[in-house]
Image (cartoon, rainbow, N blue to C red):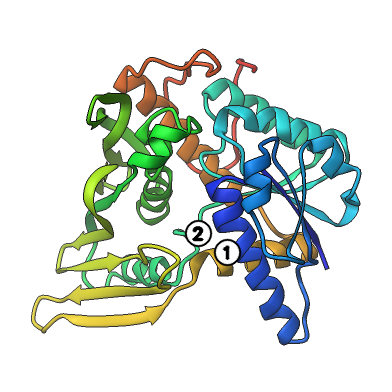
Amino acid sequence: MLQPLVVGLGRSGSGLHLKTLARLARRTAAMGDPLVALPVVGCDPRAEARGSAGAPGELMAVGTLDEALARIDPDTTVAHVCTPPRLRYDVIARLAGHGVRRLIVEKPLAASAGELDALVRLRERTDLDVVVVSHWTGSRLTGRLRRLVRDEALGPLRRITVEQHKPRFLRSLTTDGHPTALDVEIPHSLALALDLAGPAELRAAHCWDLRCEDRVLPGLGGAHIELAHRSGVTTLLRSDLGAAVRQRSVVCEFEGGTATAHFPLSEDDDHAQLLVHGPDSEAEHQVFRDDALTDFLAGAYRGFASGTAGAMNFALACATARLLCVARERCAVVARPDTVPSTAASVPAPGVPQAHAGSR
């Protein structure tokens, strides 16, 4: 079994990773093939975060990374890096220095092109196996979209439109982990678009402010991105973080029909829906279970155990992060003092990650 270490017990670390790891541990143990060792070792400097995370027996929470590292064996550890993006390089470097080689990193992979380049070099120098959270691309729903694109059952793919809307007032008002709306939901849909339609160039990007009573949070109201793929496909990504309702939908327009995919909206329900409209038939409505994050972590852990985990995922994550860097520049968002501005001018195709001259 592999020992999870979760660094950062906020919404992602506690609400998603920790709960999913506990579920995965129970599921694989019941199948007679235990994969995850409990309790998870977790660290967060905030006492309130440690006190509210994890059920009894599921978490051993400490306040510093040093304390956490003293409790794990690097050879059997999978470190989940769930800190804000601007803190990830330093955390990953410390984990690598302690001998931890298996990492699952929250999206986006880095806060700037310079940090991304430094992380690419660190990965190569220390032989890290890095998997970036991208459970949309690993979901059953995306698998069905991918088959429609590959088989051209509805003809060639022409356009992708992704709508990711949710009210996010409380978290935006009380935390500062994400500097703009580009860092919240857009990384999921951007990776999905690159996965379905291939490499792309940024055509347009725009962020707007989040307004609530007498508060204005610059750049956190939402984001709009347009892409032109080398395959000829065009993509529109929209994310409204001041929306009154939740929506996570993807419309793929083909030459001979459309496919509308609805991702599960929250952990309250893990079912996806897909509506396929052909040229000469009624819409086919598919409803199926799609617990994407649990399946994603299970695949990552089995890949770590066999030594085949992260190469392709890391390449896609690098391409996604570089496009995000260009989008941040295009939006002319004023960076926070602890965020290094990007100097990216172009975005390479998903493939072998490229390290450029900048450093952190």
Residue 280 lies, with reference to residue 198, above or below; the image says below
**Quadrant in the picture for the C terminus:** top right
Instruction: Identify the residue under disc 1.
Output: 296
Amino acid on which disc 2 is placed: His
Label pair 1/2, CB-CB below 8 angstroms: yes
Neighbours of disc 2 within 10 Å: few (<14), some (14-19), many (20+): some
Q: At 42% across and 49% down in the image, what residue appears?
A: 188
186 left or right of 123 in image? left
Residue 58's tag is: none
Q: Is residue 321 above or below residue 151?
A: above
Residue 140 percent coordinates (x, y): 44, 72
The answer to which image quadrant residue 246 occupies is bottom left
Evaluate whether residue 230 shows in this view: yes
Tally of numbered discs: 2
Q: Residue at x 51, y 33 (%)?
A: 177
The answer to whether 95 appears left or right of 108 in the picture is right
Q: In this orientation, which residue lies closer to the viewer: 22 or 151?
A: 22
Q: Position of residue 46 (x, y in %)?
A: 66, 37
Q: Nearer the viewer, residue 190 or 150?
A: 190
Q: Is residue 347 visible?
A: no
Above or below 149: residue 64? above
* Secondary structure beneath label 2: loop
Which residue: 11% across, 84% down?
Answer: 281
| Amino acid type, residue under disc 1 in the picture | Phe
Q: Is residue 69 left or right of residue 155?
A: right
Quadrant position of the N terminus in the picture: bottom right
Q: Residue 179, image x and y in percent?
A: 43, 27
Q: Which residue is mark 2?
A: 135
Please, is residue 82 above or below residue 286 in the view? above
